[in-house]
Image: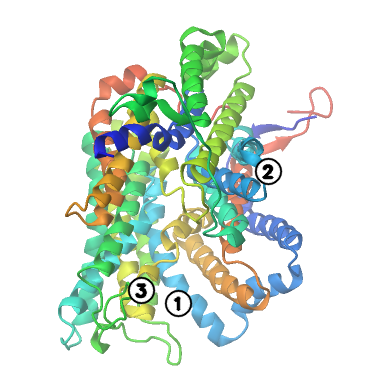
Amino acid sequence: MIPRLIRRDRASLRMAVLAPLLALAAAILVNLVLFLAMGKDPAAVFYALLLEPFLGWSSFSEVLLKTGPLLLIAQGLAIGFRAKVFNIGAEGQFILGAIFASAIPVYFPQATGGWIWPAMLVMGALGGALWAVVPAFWRVRLNANEILVTLMMSLIAAQVLNYLLLGPWKDPQGFNFPQSVMFQYDAMIPILLPGTRVNLSLLLALLSAVLAWAYMQRSFGGYQFLVGGLAPKAAAYAGFSESRAIWLSLLIGGFAAGLAGAAEVAGPIGQLQRGISTGYGYAAIIVAYLGGLHPIGIVASSLLMAALYIGGDNAMVSADLPVAAVRVFQGSLLVFYLAAITFVRFRLVWPIRKGGAA
Amino acid sequence: MSGLSFILAGMLAAATPFLLAALGELVVERAGVLNLGLEGIMALGAVVAFIVVYHGGGHVAAFGVAAVAGILLSLVFGWLALGLRANQVAVGLAVGILGQGLSSLIGNSYESLTITGLPKLAVPVLSDLPVVGGLFAQDAVVWLSLLGTAALWAMFRYSRLGLILRAVGENPQAARAIGYRVVALRLGAVVFGGAMAGLAGAYAATVYTPLWADGMIAGRGWIALALVVFGTWMTGRIFFGALLFGAVSLASLVAQTENWAVPSQLLSALPYIVTIVVLGIITSNKRLLKINGVASLGEPFGP
């Protein structure tokens, strides 16, 4: 007997809150079986991956450090996703943000002053937004799908980064490693929590959540976005401009991702190098969905995803788990979440007897 | 060998991963479904095929295992997108991320290993021609892909199945009203697309460049998705689009060997830049898209 999906009269708020938790439980279960099959001790992996990041201040501060970029990028992406503008190229916008921000310390390595790191953040945000101009123009003027164009722009960004690091921006005293010079002290964002690597950019990320909440839930502009995503024809009839929504979605997404990229090079990394992003741009897509595309939900989901990054590093050391296992975990988490949110709008009805499926 | 004859000789092989994946996606999209997970499915197919060949299983078994892996992953897509009517864009991304994660997990201990590809089968006389001769010496998979392209073209042009698939994609409500099982047909299309993407990955990792490196699919799944749009959902045009991309990726190799004064990174980015430019040119012609496009593409369907 195959159960049928019946549309609910109204969306279930209870399911909307439960869905990420159910997805997490399912992902944990399936992945523990996978780890067992790989010959790893599931209990040790579970402890290292999901508990250890929250035990102890030093590892939790590392979680907060990773939360910043994920939170920033995901808030930017979620605004677009709600308007059905699918920017999946945050990875490239993040890289461009890092490059633009690095231009200041690379070209002015001797410069001093408190203006440097704020200027780098501004440059980074502009760089990210600039990288999003191409997909926005292509979509609005040339009718081209932004999914493909943003992704291609990411692949191009990776090559731009390679070019700079192997060529003009390579540190002459860097033993030929593909990396820039180490940035000067004034190019670093001040530390927020003493004794950790967490810097002021975490506050920026939290501020982005507040701004996104105010914009999406409380302003007319955010309302236009929502209607555009849910009912494009109604939005057009009401005179809400689709082009404006596309431009804004992509520029905000690029701006936030670029800011995150700048905060990485001006923060924990302190130079431009190949490993500036460990897939933040793609992980943020999962973060945005897992948070229900809601500014507050995303704060929670970015913490979870950051913990998975830190836990993955722990599990690699203590339980000999390959880093790729974390990517599998992330992917399966999104799969289960998308399955679970079906039941926000639908309910299952088992065909037990005639007339039972009412 | 001159640059031109090098490109002519190699472009069919370079085009094959694009071609196989794009033809599979063509069938999926014709049935009204958008599967954005191609990149991940190709990566999974690539790694399992590589492992089979590496352990001496041979290419036939490798392609078979890759197709099965592609089908299994595409069933995850089908379960969510067709069974649960979830957002196809999100599901495609999820399956893509899962596939790429699985491929790098499975291939973890095979990184940078190499194997032997397949021998070239030459057409007598034609393959001895100057300049264009190389075009007629290709491996078995390329020859089979050409046959498959022709078969798919004929399927859409002449067969009842082709007509039914198109009906399901154009107007699923009407197709259902006259008695076709829309969800089952769409699932069939998704499974076919998954198998083809698996084969495309297998070709990339066991024949075209017989080695495994994490991330080796390098956007080819995404370019295949773009190719379906370039080809405006027509088999023949997709074939020529794939050839164009085969030639573009080889042109960058030629440029490197002939020491053109161009940064190698620009050449590596060339296929992506060409994709963006061509996509803009094709899609700006809205009339063309309206005539050839698939009306219900990406929309969930439930009775």
Residue drawn 42% across the image and 29% down it: B137
Q: Are marks 3 and 1 on the same chain?
A: yes
Q: Where residue A244 appears, x then y in whole percent? A: 24, 44
User: Which kind of residue does numbered mark 1 sit on?
Assistant: Leu
Q: Secondary structure at mark 2?
A: loop
Residue drawn 40% across the image and 69% down it: A275
Task: Tell me which numbered mark, 3 or 1, is placed earlier along the sequence.
Answer: 1
CB within 8 Å, label 2 to label 1:
no
**What's the CA distance linking mark 3 and mark 1?**
10 Å
Residue hosting label 2: B57
Chain letter of disc 3 in the image: A
Q: Where residue A329 appears, x then y in whole percent? A: 61, 59
- Res A264 → quadrant: bottom left
Q: Up-down: is B71 above or below B145?
A: below
| Display coloring | rainbow
Residue drawn 72% across the image and 61% down it: A38
Nearest to the observer: residue B215 or residue A114: B215
Direction from residue A323 to residue A173 in the image, left or right:
left
The quadrant of the picture occupied by the N terminus of chain A is: top right
Direction from residue A193 to residue A179 in the image, left or right:
left
Tell me the crowding category of disc 2: few under 14, some 14 to 19, or many 20 or more residues within 10 angstroms, Cα based: few
Chain letter of disc 1 in the image: A
The residue most toward the bottom is: A195
Nearest to the observer: residue B241 or residue A187: B241
User: Which kind of residue does numbered mark 2 sit on?
Assistant: Gly
Direction from residue B62 to residue B256 in the image, left or right:
left
Q: Up-down: is A17 above or below B236?
A: below
Q: Which mark is residue A264?
A: 3
Residue hosting label 1: A65
CB within 8 Å, label 2 to label 3:
no
Q: Is residue B205 visible?
A: yes
